[in-house]
Image (cartoon, helix red, strand yellow):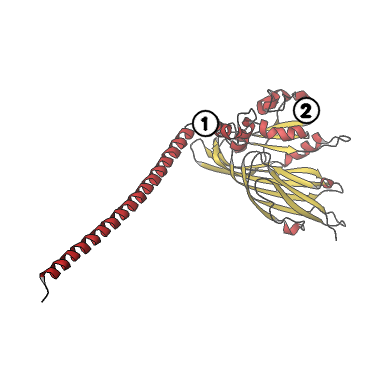
Amino acid sequence: MESPTRRGGSSGGVRVTVAAVLAAVCAVITVVLSVALVLLLVVVRREAARLSGRLDAGVESTVLGALPPAQALEVVLGQVHGRSPHTTELITSLLGGEGRRLDRSDLTISERTDLEYRLVRVDRDSYQLIMQVDYTFTNRVPTDKFVIFATSDATLRDSIVLGCRQPLFELWYIPDDPVDPLFHESVDRMLPSVRIGLQFLDAYDEPRELHDRSPLLNEVRIGRWEEHLTFFREPLGDLPRLRPEEYMRSLRVFEIDLHRVVGPAAQIGTITRLSLRSMTLQRVDDGFCYWQAPYPCYLERMQIDAAGLAADGDDPFVFRLQSFAFRSQPSPARWSPPEQVKVIDVRSWLLPGHGVVLLWKESER
C-alpha cells in the first residue's frame, strides 16, 4: 500500500503538469490569435486600399468623363509632357479632331481600315496606282461633305493632316517635275477616276448603303481655302501663317457633296463607313509609293497587286512593305517577288503622319 505522503506528491505533480499544459495551450492560442489578428489587419488594409483605389479610379473616371476629350487629355498630357503650345497638335492627332464636344461628334477614328494597292505599268517611265481604302468609324460621323486635297508641295503634304478641320478628307501627294511641271494635268486626269461608297444612317436613324458611285468634285476657290485649312488663317505650331496665293501652283482643293451622291431618296444623318477609290499616275523610277493615315486608323491589312509593274522584256521587280507606325516591320521583312506580298497583315494603329510605304527595285538574278 502506498503511503499518504506519496499519494499527495503525485497529485501535486499532476496539478503542476496540467497547469503547465494549460499555460502552454494559452500561449499557443495567444500566438495564433496574434498572428490571425495581424493577418486580418493586413487583409483589411489591403482591401481598404483596393476599395480606395477603386473609389479613386471611379472618381477620376467620372471627372474625366464629364470633360470634353481634348480637355481631359490636356490635363493628362500636361502632367506628363509639361505645358506646351505644341500639345494641341498631339491632342488633335491622338483624338482625330479637336475633341471639344462632349458627345465626341467632332472626332473621326477608323476602328478598322483596309487598304488595297494595284500597280499597272503605263509606259517606260510611268505606272498607274489604283488605290482603294475602306474606313469603318468608331463614332458616327455627322457630316455631308468629303474633301480631297491634292498637292505637290512637301510642306503642305506634312501640314494638311494637322491643319485640316474637316471630319472626312483625303490627301493626294503628287511630286512635280520642276523642269516640266505636270501637277495640274495629273490632277485633272485623276479626278474622273474617283469612286465612293457609303454606309450611313438616314434622318430616321435607318441604315442605308450605296456602292461605287462617281461623285461630282467641285473645286474650292482660293479665297475659301482657309475654311478647310487652319494654317491659312493662323499659325500652326512652328508653321507660320501661310499665304494661299503662294500655293496656287501646288495645291488644289475639291469638295464632294455627299447629299448629292446619295440622291433625293435619302437624307444623310451620320456616316458609319466610307470607301474611296482613285487612280494616280506615278513615276516608276521613284521606287516607292505610300499611304498616310488622315486620322487615327487601325490598319487591319494591306492587299497589293504589283505584278503589273514590270514592263515586257524588263527584269521583274522585288518588293518590301515598310510601316512607319507603332508596330514593327510587317512580314515579309525581306525583298520578295510580287506573289509573296499580296496580302500583308499590318494590325497596327496609325496616327496622322503614320503610314505604310511599298518599296521596289529590279530583281538581282
Residue positioned 86% across, 46% down in the render:
125
Q: Amino acid at mark 2?
A: Tyr
The mark lying in front, picked from 1 and 2, is 1
Residue denoted by label 2? 247
Residue positioned 74% across, 35% down in the render:
157
Q: Amino acid at mark 1?
A: Pro
Which of 119 and 73 lies nearest the eye of the viewer? 73
Image-quadrant location for residue 11: bottom left
Q: Secondary structure at mark 1?
A: loop
As displayed, is residue 176 above or below residue 340? Answer: above
Q: Position of residue 234 (x, y in %)?
A: 68, 23
**Label 1 crowd bin: few (<14), some (14–19), many (20+), radius 10 Å:** some
Q: Position of residue 124 (x, y in %)?
A: 87, 49
Quick one: label 1 or label 2, which is nearer the N terminus? Answer: 1
Quadrant occupied by the C terminus: bottom right
Mark 1 and mark 2: Cα distance apart in space: 35 Å
Q: Is residue 257 visible?
A: no
As displayed, is residue 170 above or below residue 84? Answer: below
Which of 20 and 45 lies nearest the eye of the viewer? 20
Image-quadrant location for residue 167: top right
Q: Residue furthest bottom?
A: 1
User: Could you tell me how many numbered marks the image carries?
Assistant: 2
Q: Is residue 69 left or right of residue 182?
A: left
Q: Is residue 323 visible?
A: yes
Q: Position of residue 273 (x, y in %)?
A: 58, 43
Q: Position of residue 59 (x, y in %)?
A: 43, 36
Which of 121 and 96 lies nearest the eye of the viewer? 96
Image-quadrant location for residue 92: top right
Residue denoted by label 1? 68
Q: Is residue 253 left or right of residue 7?
A: right
